[in-house]
């Protein structure tokens, strides 16, 4: 269990997935990739494969949100697992199409 | 959170895609990442607290921006067109610093203590000469990423502070990662010390768009680069677009840049005639008006391509008027217009524009934060919002003329005078008035072979606006004083009027 805050980065202990917290709920949550809990950026990895990777694997550049839109993650490095918070699989947030302004 | 995240993601996703082309030099995103890490090594070895840049656009600019972020020191690009004493004073404010620059600007300066110089070519050569061990970028979201000195059109330049979280929030909120096509290329012609020059680097990196740099703008070279580099996107300030349109007017007809898909503009007020002419010369191009401030990490409002087309084609004055709007706030920005007592005003009522959002820094080194307890930042821009949410700017709050307790925006009088057939350019400023405190002064530039008398111009304004708006002091000039970004230097004009 860990407290997420905007700007915090985390990585998967098993695969290559890395995320940054864009928006966080003010409570401790369990952040998982492919069913395995994610760790701090300097945490020790145990590379391998996820037992239950899930369907929607983490893709670089995609934003992921939970159903109540309280937690939002940016995937900064793609991997071989599905992202979930407290057991709830996160959905890809649809991008707002804005014209290029710079 | 650190700006380099954008670069690391781009280098991870498409390492071989070209990030920057400059003449024969092509840097891929992987090359740019390696150079940024090597540049950070140079900065750390120098043991400095800032990385200054006093130079035009070159590949050293994106390298320096990301290198400073890797090294955890603020990046401070400065305006090389300032006078020698002005530059020496700014350098004194960032010492100890490593300063990247080039001749002849550097040669003329008496460098303050603590400023160590590295020539652009040398910095670029060293940064591209070795591959350091990758280290994690430092960085709390609250760390300062960039420090920009404001243009100081009204006084001593202020040091605006932009933190990593402000800039990243802007990028994440407005750009979709890797959204650019492989062949996309942006022509960057705004100087590196302008917020638009910085956001161009960050947005292009995050979108995965190739950056082509134009060190010194002129219309012919801009068009030539668009054609030879197959440019798809460009950002210009109004003065640049005006010069491009003038140049095309002499060449005649279609601009002949088939690759170009989008032109964004901002940084000052766009004359209606210029944008309409530009839309005729570039019929297939998407135009976007971007309104933003240094203190808001760039764009906060957008007028998109569809609004440009409907405004251009419509005969309905209400729809046509939108071409003079800066559009609606981007989704991550809240905007309010407030009156003198801080009350929130309704549609059509002019007041001061306030904004709130993560990208809003609203902070200066000397004054601290101007953001209130609820997160609102007063922009000092005056304007109004119509019932459809479109924002119309009237000018800077500091330029308002207070005549006998009545607030008068120079913009509305300038718009009316510009409609006079003899007038090509005009600026309205406050002049001291014994009876009213202040009254309206105007400096007018006539079109070639055209002129009008004071009385004719005064009558023109009187028929269209209230009598309090009629200029009491009028002076004629060959041209108005602008800074290099196209902002009228009202301070200079005030001195010229009685």
Image: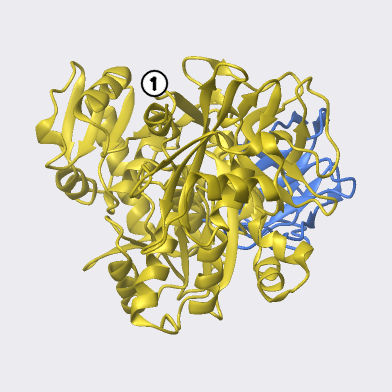
Instruction: Tell me how the rendering is colored.
Output: by chain
- Residue B437 location (% of width, % of height): 59, 18
- Residue B410 location (% of width, % of height): 59, 38
Q: Circle 1 sits on which residue? A: B156
Q: Residue at x 45, y 80 (%)?
A: B259
- Residue B456 location (% of width, % of height): 54, 50
Give left or right: position of A70 versus B186: right
Q: Residue at x 52, y 57 (%)?
A: B265
Question: Which residue is more in the foreground, B349 or B477?
Answer: B477
Question: Which residue is more in the foreground, B187 or A18?
Answer: B187
Subunit that carries the residue with mark 1 = B
Q: Give the class, few, some or many, for how many residues have Cα within 10 Å of label 1's Cα (few <14, many ≥20).
A: few
Q: Residue at x 44, y 43 (%)?
A: B487
Residue extending farthest to the left is B107
Shade representing chain A: blue
Chain that the image shows in yellow:
B
Q: Is residue B478 in view from this perspective?
A: yes
Quadrant (top left, top right, bottom left, bottom right) of the N terminus of chain A? top right
- Residue B86 location (% of width, % of height): 26, 25
Give left or right: position of B103 versus B488: left
Q: Is residue A18 above or below residue B320?
A: above
Question: Which residue is more in the foreground, B14 or B160?
Answer: B160
């Amino acid at each position: 269990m860990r407290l997420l805050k905007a700007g915090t980065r985390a990585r998967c202990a098993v695969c290559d997935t890395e995320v940054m917290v864009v928006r966080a709920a003010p409570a401790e949550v369990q952040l998982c990739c492919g069913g395995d809990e994610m760790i701090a950026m300097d945490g020790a990895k145990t590379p391998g494969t996820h037992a239950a990777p899930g369907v929607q694997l983490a893709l670089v550049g995609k934003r992921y949100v939970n159903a109540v839109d309280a937690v939002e993650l940016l995937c900064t490095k793609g991997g071989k697992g599905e992202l979930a918070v407290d057991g709830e699989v996160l959905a890809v947030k649809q991008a707002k199409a804005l014209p290029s302004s710079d | 959170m650190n700006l380099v995240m954008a670069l690391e993601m781009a280098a991870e996703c498409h390492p071989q895609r070209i990030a920057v082309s400059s003449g024969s030099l092509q840097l891929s995103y992987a090359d740019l990442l390696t150079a940024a890490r090597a540049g950070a090594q140079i900065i750390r070895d120098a043991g400095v607290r800032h990385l200054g840049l006093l130079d035009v656009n070159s590949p050293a600019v994106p390298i320096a921006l990301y290198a400073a972020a890797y090294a955890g020191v603020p990046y401070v690009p400065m305006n090389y067109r300032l006078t020698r004493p002005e530059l020496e004073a700014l350098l004194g404010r960032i010492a100890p610093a490593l300063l990247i620059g080039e001749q002849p600007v550097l040669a003329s300066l008496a460098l303050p203590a603590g400023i160590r110089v590295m020539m652009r070519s040398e910095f670029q050569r060293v940064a591209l000469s070795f591959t350091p061990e990758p280290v994690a970028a430092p960085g709390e979201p609250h760390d300062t990423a960039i420090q920009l000195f404001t243009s100081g059109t009204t006084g001593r330049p202020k040091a605006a502070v932009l933190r990593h979280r402000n800039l990243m929030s802007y990028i994440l909120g407005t750009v979709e990662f890797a959204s650019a096509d492989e062949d996309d290329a942006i022509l960057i012609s705004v100087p590196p010390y302008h917020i638009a020059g910085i956001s161009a680097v960050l947005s292009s990196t995050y979108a995965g768009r190739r950056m082509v740099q134009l060190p010194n703008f002129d219309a012919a070279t801009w068009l030539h680069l668009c054609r030879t580099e197959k440019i798809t996107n460009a950002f210009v300030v109004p003065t640049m677009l005006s010069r491009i349109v003038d140049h095309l007017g002499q060449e005649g007809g279609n601009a002949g840049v088939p690759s170009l898909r989008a032109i964004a503009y901002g940084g000052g007020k766009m004359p209606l005639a210029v944008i309409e002419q530009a839309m005729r010369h570039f019929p297939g191009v998407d135009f976007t008006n971007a309104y933003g401030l240094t203190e808001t990490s760039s764009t906060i409002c957008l007028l998109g391509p569809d609004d440009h087309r409907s405004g251009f084609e419509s005969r309905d004055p209400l729809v046509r008027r939108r071409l003079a709007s800066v559009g609606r706030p981007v989704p991550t920005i809240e905007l309010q217009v407030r009156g003198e007592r801080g009350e929130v005003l309704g549609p059509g009522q002019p007041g001061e524009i306030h904004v709130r959002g993560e990208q809003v820094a609203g902070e200066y080194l000397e004054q601290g934060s101007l953001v209130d307890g609820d997160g609102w930042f007063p922009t000092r821009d005056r304007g109004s919002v119509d019932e459809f949410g479109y924002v119309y700017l009237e000018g800077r709050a500091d330029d308002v003329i207070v005549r006998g307790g009545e607030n008068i925006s120079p913009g509305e009088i300038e718009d009316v005078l510009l409609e006079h057939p003899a007038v090509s350019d005009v600026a309205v400023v406050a002049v001291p008035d014994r009876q009213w405190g202040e009254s309206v002064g105007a400096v007018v530039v006539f079109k070639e072979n055209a002129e009008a008398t004071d009385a004719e111009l005064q009558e023109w304004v009187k028929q269209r606006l209230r009598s309090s708006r009629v200029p009491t002091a009028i002076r004629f000039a060959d041209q108005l004083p602008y800074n290099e970004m196209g902002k009228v230097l009202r301070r200079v004009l005030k001195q010229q009027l009685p």
